[in-house]
Image: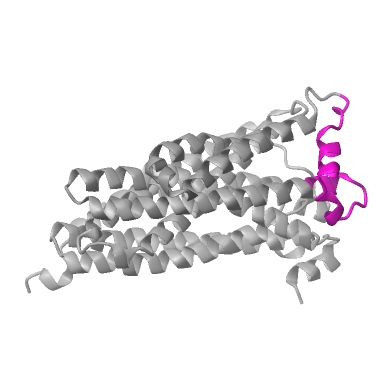
Amino acid sequence: MNPLLLAADAAGYTTPPTWRILTKTGYFVGLSGAIGATVTYATTVRPSLRGARSAGDPGDAVVLRSRSAACLAWAGLVLLLAGYFQLAGRVARAGKGMAFGDALAPGAIMDFLRAPAAKGAWIAQGDLYIVQNLVLLVTAAALLALSAPPVRRHVDRIALAALPGALAITLIGAVPATTPADLDRWLDLLLNQVHIVSGSVWLGGLVLLVALAGTRARLGDGAGALWADMWRRFSLVALVCVGAVLLSGLWLSWKHVGAVSQLWTTGYGLALLVKLLLVLGLVAAGAFNQFWLMPRIARARRADETASLRHLTLRHFPLVVWGEVVLGLAVLAVVPFLAGSARAEAGSPKAVSSGSLFAAGAAMALALAVSLYATAKASDALSRRAPASSVPA
């Protein structure tokens, strides 16, 4: 039996309907694809390909640019479909007793978007959704244009132009129609977006890179050096994302969970516990990359071991990343079950921030930043160590 259903019996948790699970998961998959692919292309793929061209080895760069354009086009298609179903889901939730199939009708969507502003709101909620979905439509169209071969040579410009739009989709959707009443509400909105954007960059970037690694049969013998540079660049991006996900996740968990026991005595808490375990798996895989794979890649690159470098970057590393992608998609599948609050289910009081809490949060943020910096330095130190086989007896 589904453990979430057991929690529902015990704590009054309401399992989301199937259409809600599918639309919300699909929406975050679409966001991850658009945000992660554009950010990773701008920060990781594009600089590495430029370096390959300047080094006089443009063949691999041409192959990877073409595959990148195709991946970005697919990201645009998924974003477009996910955005439509997510909007229909909003209509179904707003209409009392409305079936999801009825909410898919254009007329129902238009009625929802034209609804007048609520009392005390500075803008109608429908107007915000109109702006959000117009940005989504333009961003998806720009990415979809890369499916045409003549347009693919402009992948750099289109990816950079689509990046702000991809980020704006989730940011506009988070704008409240009524002014938040206190600082806690502002922090909820801010840190929730930090959580979404950083998680999207992390997962979407992994998907893009593992898709690009699928071109290894078409790449030259020296492609290992190019991929070593890409994995190095993305590892830095991933470190920042990990820090942002953990820090924002701590705040959101504290807001919704009042005691450790609520993680297994409430439906919300159980869903959160599953998500935490999956995220820990992602972090463990990232640590394996940082402390085992990246140092070996760096040593092979310095020693000019072409075959070993190619194996590590295009065979071994993508296998680990595939595992991370599976865990990341599982996280997105759990997100729809995070409905309500464990505090509400357990009858605990709402979380109220204080000066001491902010001081503790600042200390934790500093400790996390130091630990991530130490992780990067430790990985760099390991890469400079000679392998055991080369150390004299």
Quarter assignment of residue 214: bottom left
Percent x, y of residue 280? 52, 61
Against 369, residue 75 (above or below) is below
Q: Nearer the viewer, residue 17 or 385?
A: 17
Residue located at (66% from left, 56% from top): 25
Determine whether, in the image, residue 139 is placed left or right of residue 367. right
Percent x, y of residue 97? 93, 52
Percent x, y of residue 239? 41, 49
Against 182, residue 97 (above or below) is below
Residue located at (24% from left, 59% from top): 223
Q: The C terminus appears in which quarter of the rendering?
A: bottom left
Determine whether, in the image, residue 320 is placed left or right of residue 19. left
Q: The N terminus appears in which quarter of the rendering?
A: bottom right
Percent x, y of residue 157? 41, 36
State whether residue 326 appears in this view.
yes
Tell whether position 236 is magenta: no
State whether residue 235 appears in this view.
no
Determine whether, in the image, residue 157 is placed left or right of residue 244. left
Residue located at (50% from left, 54% from top): 203
Q: Nearer the viewer, residue 320 or 20?
A: 20
Q: Give the residues in magenta.
A: 90-119
Q: What colour-coding does the image apply?
A: one colour
- In the image, farthest residue toward the right: 97
Residue located at (43% from left, 60% from top): 211
Quarter assignment of residue 392: bottom left
